[in-house]
């Protein structure tokens, strides 16, 4: 069985490949299928809707079982922002560094105990017969006072994950891939996938 990971984000792709590696399925990227960067407008108002938009579009284009992740960071004192706008927080095409700087600036003056936040990942799976489902995972933590560590991507250097005194930037990738929002969503996704196809 083949599945395609519907993302342009190479870091997400790596993490999701890693999480699917023990299953007996062939995991394809858009690149493997000869697609260059595919722009899909994320017009939904929730992570679930945006994940479905991406997975449906890629299923249409490839005819294969398509798996999309829509994810982001929700900060308590910002009322859940940046949320679904996490990738473009500091503007269209903003870099991870610019997004992190903007967030740190907004939280300037807040002590650690007021910097609660969570990562959210919604994963949508769309099948060639139009069956579809979504699952969600979250990961609780705090926004650090300044960036730490080189691992991961996005907001990882400023996210201190609960239960560790480290940011996702400082934590080993194998550990992140066991405890993250995406890991939790992918575990649920695998259970659901197993119910629908014989692995
Ligand atoms: P695709 O839509 O092509 O999958 P994207 O990067 O645009 O790629 P999203 O729209 O879901 O993906 O935006 C998610 C953003 O949230 C991502 O760019 C990061 O800034 C942030 N994010 C999500 N998961 C993260 C993680 O595990 N670590 C750090 N930042 C994360």
Image (spheres, rainbow, N blue to C red):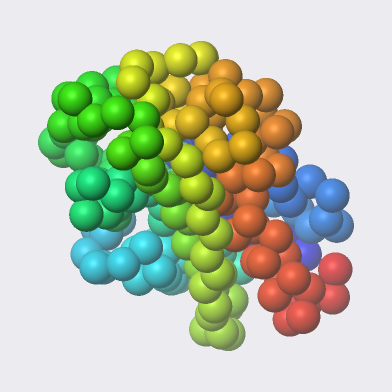
Q: Where residue 49 sits in the image (x, y, percent)?
A: 35, 71
Asked whether 162 or 175 is in front, the reply is 162
Q: Is residue 61 visible?
A: no
The residue lying at 51 percent from left, 55 percent from top is: 138
Quadrant the C terminus occupies? bottom right
The residue lying at 51 percent from left, 26 percent from top is: 167
The residue lying at 70 percent from left, 33 percent from top is: 175
Q: Is residue 75 above or below residue 188?
A: above
Asked whether 194 or 74 is in front, the reply is 74
Q: Where residue 76 sits in the image (x, y, percent)?
A: 29, 49
Q: Is residue 91 above or below residue 194?
A: above
Q: Quadrant of residue 127?
A: bottom right
Q: Where residue 59 sits in the image (x, y, percent)?
A: 50, 68
Asked whether 69 or 117 is in front, the reply is 117
Q: Is residue 166 above or below residue 143?
A: above
- Say whether residue 192 is left or right of residue 6: right
Quadrant the N terminus occupies? bottom right
Point out the quarter of the image occupied by ligand 1: top left
Q: Quadrant of residue 187?
A: bottom right
The residue lying at 57 percent from left, 25 percent from top is: 165
């Amino acid at each position: 069985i083949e599945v395609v990971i519907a993302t342009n984000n190479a870091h997400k792709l790596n993490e999701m490949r890693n999480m699917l590696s023990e299953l007996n399925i062939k995991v394809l990227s858009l690149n493997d299928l000869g697609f260059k960067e595919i722009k899909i407008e994320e017009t939904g108002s929730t992570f679930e809707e945006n994940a479905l938009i991406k997975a449906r579009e890629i299923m249409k284009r490839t005819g294969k079982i398509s798996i999309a992740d829509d994810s982001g960071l929700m900060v308590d004192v910002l009322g859940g922002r940046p949320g679904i706008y996490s990738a473009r927080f500091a503007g269209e095409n903003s870099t991870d560094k610019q997004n992190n700087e903007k967030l740190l600036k907004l939280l300037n003056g807040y002590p650690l105990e007021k910097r609660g936040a969570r990562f959210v990942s919604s994963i949508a799976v769309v099948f060639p017969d139009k069956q579809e489902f979504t699952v969600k995972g979250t990961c609780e933590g705090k926004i650090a006072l300044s960036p730490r560590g080189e691992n991961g991507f996005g907001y990882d250097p400023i996210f201190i994950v609960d239960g560790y005194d480290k940011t996702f930037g400082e934590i080993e990738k194998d550990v992140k891939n066991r405890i993250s929002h995406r890991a939790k969503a992918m575990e649920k996704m695998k259970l659901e996938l197993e119910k629908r196809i014989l692995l």
